[in-house]
Amino acid sequence: MGSCDGKFYALDKHSGRVAWSHDVRAEGSSGAFKTAPLIRQGLVIAGTANQCSEKGSDYVYAFDRQTGKVHWKQVASADSDAFTVVLGEDPNAPVVFGTREGEWLSINADSGAVIWRYRATSRGMNCESRTSIVSDGVTVCLLAHDGSIHCLDGKSGRELWKQRPDSTITTDVLMYKDVLYFGTADSRITGLNPANGEKLVRLRTPYTPSGGIVESYPDIKDEFLFVYATVGNSSTGAALTLSDEFESVVWSRTSAEHWTSRKPELWKGVLVAGNCQGDLVGYRIRDGEPQWHAHVDGCVDGLAHDDSTLYISVREGAVYAY
């Protein structure tokens, strides 16, 4: 995991002991790790970015997964919500990510060499606006700083199409069963054909979807999709479960506070959500009934899990294992 003080950590999952760490401040950088890291072959790839108003040299790093040694670093202010891999079954597939400057790069995962660059927006865009990126292994689709959707040929970076929806996009983009999905401020989920931008799905939701959209894990019997939501202009949050291919809303549950964990986490048959008061709730996946509550000290920011353990990070700089 990365931190806002410029340190990147690998922890032993059983004890929380630091296995290795890297501090970019030792290199003269003031950047913070804000993107979700990508594990690729024997590497962990993560990027830094300064504050919106600050200028500085930031990098995308490839760390050796076992030792933390820097395998390569590429000058870039990494800004997308996650990295994506093109042609995911190919061990030599490139990695694609976005920057604060509105540029998107495809790089060789082993060497860090740039394969292609794509300019999505002009410089000076609002770097706090939502961006994200997905790929189906052939096409790369991205949400740019100005709220427009762009789909590119993954090998060449050639633009296939771009469009800006009528309503502001409020979620990450998701590639699911060959359709590109995203939520918008008018309380809808839209699905587009990634090859040409044709509209295929339009689902009305009870609340405005927000954050990351999550698909069911293979061990979950029913194929559902999950997303957070906001209720009007209030501080009330919600969790939504949607049927396969976004045909209908299966259930929704509201909460007194917005959920601040970046996306729902599916663990042991429940949807886990956390807020800035340190509250966590586990909703039963099939019907949304609360199964348990927990509390941590801090604003819940990230959730992850393995078969036995739920990991929780908070903005105040702590990590919990439950």
Image (cartoon, helix red, strand yellow):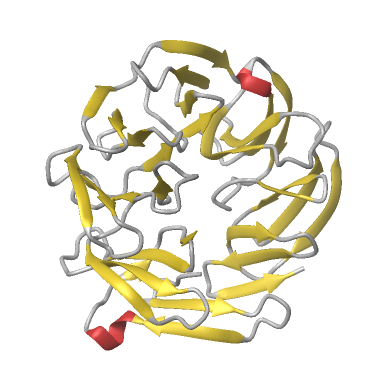
- For the question of whether residue 55 can be seen, the reply is yes
**In this image, 249 relative to 106: left or right?**
right
The residue nearer to you, when weighing 203 against 235, is 203
The count of marks equals 0
| Image quarter of residue 219 | top right
Where does the image place residue 93, in percent across and percent down from the top left? 39, 49
Where does the image place residue 122, in percent across and percent down from the top left? 12, 40
Q: Is residue 123 above or below residue 254?
A: below
- For the question of whether residue 232 can be seen, the reply is no
Q: Residue at x 41, y 64 (%)?
A: 45
Q: Residue at x 35, y 59 (%)?
A: 109
**In this image, 118 relative to 264: left or right?**
left
The residue nearer to you, when weighing 37 against 202, is 37
**In this image, 216 relative to 209: left or right?**
right
| Image quarter of residue 203 | top right
| Image quarter of residue 204 | top right
Q: Is residue 89 above or below residue 165?
A: below
Q: Residue at x 61, y 47 (%)?
A: 259
Where does the image place residue 159, in percent across and percent down from the top left? 22, 28
Q: Residue at x 71, y 58 (%)?
A: 279
**In this image, 110 relative to 187: left or right?**
left
Q: Where, quadrant-wise, is the C terminus in this rendering?
A: bottom right
Where does the image place residue 263, in percent across and percent down from the top left? 58, 46
Q: Is residue 130 above or below residue 187?
A: below
